[in-house]
Amino acid sequence: MANGAIEKTAENAHEAAIIRALGARSIVLVGMMGAGKSSVGRRLAGRLGIPFVDADAEIEVAAGMTIPEIFNSHGEPYFRAGEARVIARLLNSGPQVLATGGGSMMDENTRALIRDKGVSVWLKADLETLLRRTKRRNDRPLAEKIKDLLPLREPVYSQADIVVQSRDDPHDTIIDEIIVALPKKLGIAEDAP
């Protein structure tokens, strides 16, 4: 029991050091739809004790309609412009874990803002995983285009500060990998608590 308490204290100190080093920056999860940005992001935020924000949900609130409705009524360029504005606003509200839409990183200005105001984490998932996770969802207008979009987006996603493989392991495993990778990017000594 005592060893477990010591490990938990060390874990909490490690996570507190991450939050201190993060300052007002956000941890920004990027990647394709179906990579697990929202589900991993919620748990990561809970573990670090900071807010979780889903950019897609914020876009829907700002627009007063769902993402499929925005696509159908106004088209993708209109959606992307609104998405860029919402992400820019959200990046001023750190620290937080921010899950972004799959296409948001394709905007050069959004990428620059994320570099300036965040630490980006690419949840990299293979095509089969993405297809399996999105095939039953009808709320993702571009889901049927994953095979075409993935090779176009991966080179941009690869510019992220941290890359973690999204797979069917428990979410805590993925979160542990992110938490282990954050100190190096944040300039925290490896042996710091």
Image: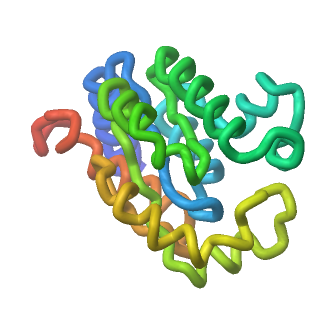
Q: How is the image coloured?
A: rainbow
Dividing the picture into quarters, in which one does residue 6 lie?
Answer: top left
Q: Residue at x 61, y 47 (%)?
A: 101
Say whether residue 91 is left or right of residue 168: left
Q: Residue at x 37, y 52 (%)?
A: 178
Could you tell me which quadrant the C terminus lies in?
top left
Whether residue 73 is situated above or below residue 30 in the rendered picture: above
Q: Position of residue 191 (x, y in %)?
A: 11, 43
State the residue in front, 187 or 72.
Answer: 72
* Residue 2 visible in the picture: no
Say whether residue 85 is left or right of residue 189: right
Q: Position of residue 92 (x, y in %)?
A: 48, 15
* Residue 98 visible in the picture: yes
Q: Position of residue 144 (x, y in %)?
A: 73, 72
Q: Residue at x 41, y 32 (%)?
A: 109
Say whether residue 133 is left or right of residue 10: right
Q: Position of residue 49 (x, y in %)?
A: 51, 28
State the residue in front, 80 or 52.
Answer: 80
Say whether residue 167 is left or right of residue 7: right
Q: Residue furthest bottom?
A: 128
Whether residue 109 is situated above or below residue 43 in the rendered picture: above
Q: Residue at x 78, y 75 (%)?
A: 135
Tag count: 0
